[in-house]
Amino acid sequence: MISSTALAHESKIYSQFSVLYDRIFSNVFAKRIDQVIGSMNIEPGSRVLEVGVGTGLSLTAYPPHCDVLGVDLAEDMLSRAQRKIDRSGMDHVELAVGDAQALDFPDDSFDYVTSFHVVSVVPDPQAMMREMTRVCRPGGRLVIINHFRSPRRLVASVVDRLDPITRRLGWRTTLGASELLDEVELEDVRRFKTSPTSLFTVVIARKPHPDESVRAAG
Ligand SMILES: C[S@@+](CC[C@H](N)C(=O)[O-])C[C@H]1O[C@@H](n2cnc3c(N)ncnc32)[C@H](O)[C@@H]1O
């Protein structure tokens, strides 16, 4: 595992929390992540970057015929993910310490860039979105699962009141999906919920080829 000294406030919370994380969240998150990754039909030989991989709840969902790199700022979370990798012999998965807002990879490096429950945790979600798009190859897919601010005003105003509390726990409730999506140029954008009552939205989109963006602009 590659390591770094950077540790944002948000990740410090997750480091302190890493012991309890799977017990609290695996039931809430893992099934949806499995369903979404399974639906992507990831092709053999694909390079996948998962940003904010945490304790690796998602890792068993990736097919062994692709290469997965998971990055996160919190080394304690990554240690737990590493244990899962070792236990299950997931030779196709590697981990590294890294900041979602300043990814240490060249442009167009990955076929899939995924991130689950992270965009409302980082201080600058727009920078994270730009970085995820930058490192995805043209024609590659971005896959995000997150809670976003409801477009329904009443629901949003109630949930907004929880924001000061959830911020202390490390995430904000006020981030709207369009605040992210307006930041970058994407196509075939699909936004959906895996069940009508789910609090979480799945966003799947394609990074256009440069000539396609020029054509669309002209
Ligand atoms: C709610 S957890 C989600 C973990 C995992 N994706 C999941 O669905 O279980 C948020 C994760 O984002 C990580 N994180 C916070 N700030 C980050 C940053 N700037 N760069 C990379 N990871 C970050 C935390 O350490 C934590 O593991």
Image: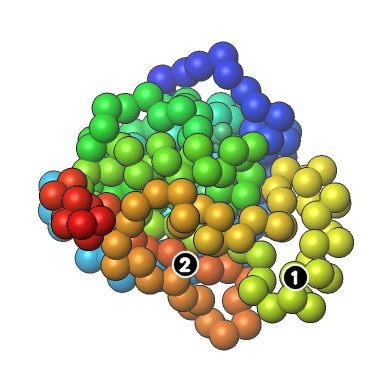
Q: Amino acid at mark 1?
A: Ala
Give the residue at x 43% y 64%. 203
* Residue annotated with mark 1: 156
Residue 40 to residue 128: above or below:
below
Q: In the structure shown, which secondary structural element does the residue marked by tag 1 occupy? A: helix
- Locate residue 68, reporting x and y percent: 30, 42
Does dot 2 land on a helix, a strand or a loop? Answer: strand
Circle 1 Cα neighbour tier, 10 Å, few/some/many (<14 / 14–19 / ≥20)? some
Front of the two marks 2 and 1: 1
Looking at this view, is 54 or 40 the one in front? Answer: 40
- The N terminus: image quadrant: top left
Camera-nearest residue between 161 and 75: 161
What residue does disc 2 label? 202
**In the shown orientation, is residue 164 left or right of residue 46?**
right
Position of residue 165 measured from the top left corner of the image (x, y, whole percent): 85, 51
The residue under the point 46% across, 75% down is 192
Q: Residue furthest top?
A: 5
Left or right, 7 with reference to 39: right
x, y percent for residue 16: 73, 33
